[in-house]
Amino acid sequence: MRLVADLHIHSRFSRATSPETDLNALAHWAKRKGIDLLGTGDFTHPSWWKDLKECLEPQGNGLLRYEGIWFLATAEVAAIWKEDGRTRKVHLILLVPGLEAADRVNRALARIGNLAADGRPILGISAKRLVEAVWDAVPEAEVIPAHVWTPWFSVFGSRSGFDRLEECFQEHTQRIFAIETGLSSDPAMNWRLSSLDRLALVSSSDAHSPPKLGREATLFDLPEPSYDGLVLALKSRDPGRFLGTIEFFPEEGKYHYDGHRACGVVLAPQEAMARRNLCPVCGLPLTVGVMHRVEELADRPAGQGPPTKIPYQRVVPLHEIIAQALGVGSETKGVSKEYERLVSCYGSEFRILLDLANEDLARHTPPQVLAGIRKVRRGELEIDPGYDGVFGRVRIPLAPPEEPRLF
């Protein structure tokens, strides 16, 4: 059974999230996107936890069910501490088998920090101590370092991270079996570090609003959905069960290149290194991005990797393709109307972007939109890389439409 899973999302109780992010909206957009399994996100927050307990139905397999969508109890937590004279800030994704297990984790973490302050709680202990607290509460729980390359809040981040997993997790490193690559990196970038070869590279949307679900996701083929089956697929990296990931073009991520947002400066790693990582406008330190950190830590050249590689596919969200085909903004009514029409015709966004042949899409897809989908599939894009919190800009080279119109 193929499952499209998006395990790292947020509720309306996390900072900078949509107030419309409730279970109804999540289930609605999961169906639109073609997502079978969602992380609950934020199970540590008391108000969201109350919603989850009231609405989600345990299935006896470590998973939950709501409106035809599978859910897995997940949360993102921030460990912030001082070590070796530096402030360390590492975000971790927690996976637990069911509501009772989530409740035990909540009780343990409530003794450490204020879980009600934010859906992504800040806990003033080291990552090592945090994982110990989680595993003491629920031995079956799993921990995945989140968006591992982003500068500010990740295990390899330039501003607050480490050069090796062992430096962060110490004697517990071998229990970490997967990392989340994040929007600003893809598997090929991570393959350049041989120390990561034993890990599963997973992708998730980190969505702060329901329409952003599935901008990245992980693909499984399980005999039947279950917590244990999903964890085993990742731990074993069995290509028959862990099928791969769906990826952003990493240049579009908002920390791909180095830069200084206040000055509008964006630099490739080599350019930043030549300037000693200082902004050429104001002289202050640049925010060193993901590509730079990969170059610093890599022990393989670009294009090389481990003998066995789990595949991945890059996508541009269907809303963006339609918007560029129409020559209008992605949030306009015309784009939403055409998106709904196409999804109604073909079943889901991922079916359109990944599964259907061009000739099948041609039956109901306007030529300009179809041309955009084809170009994305071939990687024929022009991208201005993201930097210092600014998303990159993806342009699909299409002939301009005669005029903005509805299809």
Image (spheres, grey):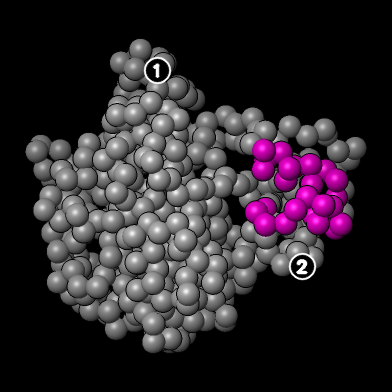
Q: Which mark is residue 395?
A: none
The percent coordinates of residue 49 (x first, y second) are: 36, 77
> With 360 as the anchor, is 222 left or right in this view?
left
Q: Nearer the viewer, residue 63 or 121?
A: 63
Most common SS among magenta residues: helix
The quarter of the picture where residue 68 lies is bottom right
Disc 1 crowd rating (10 Å Cα; few below 14, some 14-19, many 20+) is few
Q: Residues within 10 Å of mark 2 (few under 14, many from 20)?
A: few
Question: Which label's residue is closer to the chain start, 2 or 1?
Answer: 1
Q: Is residue 294 magenta?
A: no
Provide the residue designation for mark 2: 344
Q: Which residue is label 1 attached to?
A: 270
Residue that extends furthest to the right in the rendered view of this protein? 402
Tell me the residue at 39%/17% (across/down).
Answer: 270
Q: CA distance from mark 2 to mark 1?
A: 46 Å
Residue at image position (40%, 59%) is 238
Q: Residue at x 35, y 73 (%)?
A: 228
Q: Is residue 357 magenta?
A: yes
Magenta segment boundaries in residue numbering: 353-378
In the image, what residue type sits under mark 1? Gln
Residue at point 28% right, 65% down? Answer: 142
Q: Viewed as shown, does residue 308 lie left or right of 365?
A: left
- Residue 2 falls in image quadrant: bottom right
The quadrant of the picture occupied by the C terminus is bottom right
Q: Position of residue 325 (x, y in %)?
A: 78, 43
Quadrant of the rendering where the N terminus is positioned:
bottom right
| Residue 121 visible, this orientation | no
Q: Is residue 244 above or below residue 36?
A: above
